[in-house]
Image (cartoon, grey):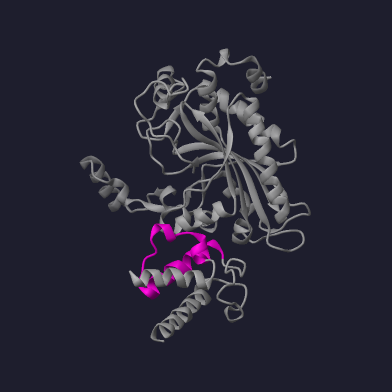
Amino acid sequence: MTAHVTLGTREQARDGAPTLEAFSRQLLASGILSPSGVDGVWVRSATFERITEAVQRSVTALGRGRYETIQVPPVIARATLERAGYVRSFTDLVGSVHVFRGSDQQHADLLRRCDAGTDWAAVLDPADVMLSSAACHHVYPMCAGRLPPGGRRVEVRGECFRHEPSSQVTRHRSFRMHELVFVGEPVDALTHRDAGLAEGLELLSTLGLTVEAAAANDPFFGRAGAILADGQRQDAAKYEGVAPVGDLPTAIMSANYAAEHFGAAFAIATAGGVVAHSSCVAFGLDRVALALLSAHGLDVDRWPVGVRQRLWQ
Amino acid sequence: MAQDIVGADITEQIREVIERFGNLVVDMADLDDADDLFRAGMSSFGNISVMLALEESFNVEFPEPMLRRDTFETVASIRRAVLQLLEQ
């Protein structure tokens, strides 16, 4: 989490760029994103998808064929999210799936609540799945056991949810992550993180974005989270690639070294038999698209030729 | 003299909490007060368990500025923090 600029009502930032507020207004007027009726959930147009699909192809190209590729669902086993430590450390971001398992009598109760406009969801029970918080969480159970020599590389893409309701167009509750994940020897995990950060920043720069690396920490919950965040910064475990959307510096990618956290949680061993380390390089596809729209304008066909060639040729 | 005895008791109490909640990979008895607990295997989650157990044990609450890794790095650093809170 990096420092965010406080929004004013100005149209232009000091450097002449539109403010986030002005950019958002133009973006919504263009129909590239449309409001869904709740904060942080946006309906995406074909133009927006054209951009995110092109960014996905660019991220895949970064992998140079070295990664197994998987596409993951928007829900994840409750047990996996627990083992990943997400429920403990990011309690306020978790999204739970609830289902109806009641009797006819309870169904009647639900209908009465619906008719009365009262809380019908109180009749539901938690399911055995949660909303997926990070695409890479799906990868670690797949790697349980002993890894092959050299570890395992997985490219993973999926819909994610984090309960951070905000009216800002940069903060989506429902968003897409595209990650390059490595699980294996400790030194290789760190190398993967560092190389992935450098290559990711270069990719974003070649797309015409002004992007900078910044040491960061995850938004761990509560007082316990303050210790985790401090530890993460002390370990230089997380970096973000930050680019402006309007005048708001926005994290559009991250490079994370999780050390033995996931290896221990999911009983993953290296070929040599020690607890595996992991790292991931993650791109927020929706935020990269927003940064591109902010940098190059809302008319994609008028983006700089070099950027269009990189994305679509 | 009295203060030394209190100080010794506090150190012992801290050591007991770390031994119980720190998930160290070495024997607590082999660690000096200045030894790095993270090098001795205390994980971030172990750190949090120790923090919560210390708060319960001493009936104190670590304020925000103390919620840092270096507060919990050694028995000695924890002791300094606990003494500071007990004196308030």
- Does residue B10 appear to the left or right of A147 in the view shown? left
> Residue A53: x, y in percent?
59, 27
Please tell me in which quadrant of the rendered image residue A83 appears.
bottom right
Q: Nearer the viewer, residue A136 or B60?
A: B60
Residue lying at the far left of the rendered structure:
A116
- The relative height of residue B41 versus residue A158 in the rendered view (above or below) is below
Residue at image position (58%, 77%) is: B32
Residue at image position (35%, 31%) is: A37
Part of the protein shown in magenta: B43-72
Q: Is residue A113 magenta?
A: no
Residue lying at the far front of the rendered structure:
B1
Please tell me in which quadrant of the rendered image residue A62 appears.
top right
> Residue A127: x, y in percent?
44, 52
Q: Nearer the viewer, residue B63 or B24?
A: B63
> Residue A115: x, y in percent?
23, 40
Q: Nearer the viewer, residue A75 or A298?
A: A298
Q: Does the magenta stretch include residue B52?
A: yes
Quadrant into which the C terminus of chain A falls: top right
